[in-house]
Amino acid sequence: MSFRIYTKTGDRGMTSLIGGSKVPKSHLRIEAYGTVDELNSHLGLCRDLLEDEVSRGQLSEIQDRLFTIGSTLACEPGKDTGMQLPSLDEADISCIEAEIDRMTEATPPMRSFILPGGHVAVSHLHIARCVCRRAERCCVRLLDGDTARDAALIMQYLNRLSDYLFTLARYTTHSLQVAEIPWQPRKKKERKSVDA
């Protein structure tokens, strides 16, 4: 017997959280875990585009952690779902920080703001970084005032992840021997004085 992907239960704009309660699909909780899912999909594309095996392996680990975050966000707050979900740990954040430090050591110092681009993999990493920041903003709005340990770890992880993605974009640029694109602000044109 095959499993049908469509259930028709969400046709009226409602969906269920893990725990059973129904909320509108426009609910901030749905927006938060949906944006984390969007980020996860972008990272899958980035992983497919990268050639560096260490970076590909790290992105696989990060995708797993994002599934953990999405599962946590999909749970009905304060309700025991009876499910054993994986957890996010401080070690997950430390792992990202160690990777940022490793890549920073191997990358020339940044001397100016840089524009996304130069190689398709680099551009996609910058897109993922921007989606990560949006996911972080959604989670901050959702979890503001939530004192649960998971809430703090989710916000810390996403904040550090966007730094990681920026660093990975620069590291990839350097590894591929592609020139970074420095931002050169347009100079204001001098206004000519007009005689009255």
Image (cartoon, helix red, strand yellow):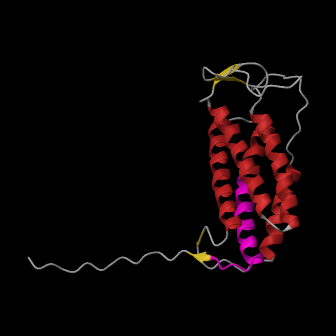
Say above or below: 123 vs 110: above
Percent x, y of residue 149: 80, 39
In the image: residue 111, left or right of residue 49: left
Which residue is farthest left? 196
Q: What is the magenta range? A: 159-180
Please give the name of the residue rendered at 74% of the width and 77% of the height, measured from the top-left corner: 174
- Residue 76's place in the image compared with 40, above or below, is above
Q: Quadrant of the C terminus?
A: bottom left
Q: Main secondary structure of the magenta part?
A: helix
Q: Residue at x 62, y 39 (%)?
A: 141
Say which of 130 and 196 sits in front: 130
Q: Is residue 166 magenta?
A: yes
**Which image quadrant for residue 190?**
bottom left
Q: Is residue 4 left or right of residue 115?
A: right
Q: Is residue 6 magenta?
A: no
**Horizontal and vertical percent position of residue 49:** 76, 62
The answer to whether residue 187 is visible is yes
- Can the viewer see residue 144? no
Identify which residue is drawn at 72% across, 61% down. Answer: 165
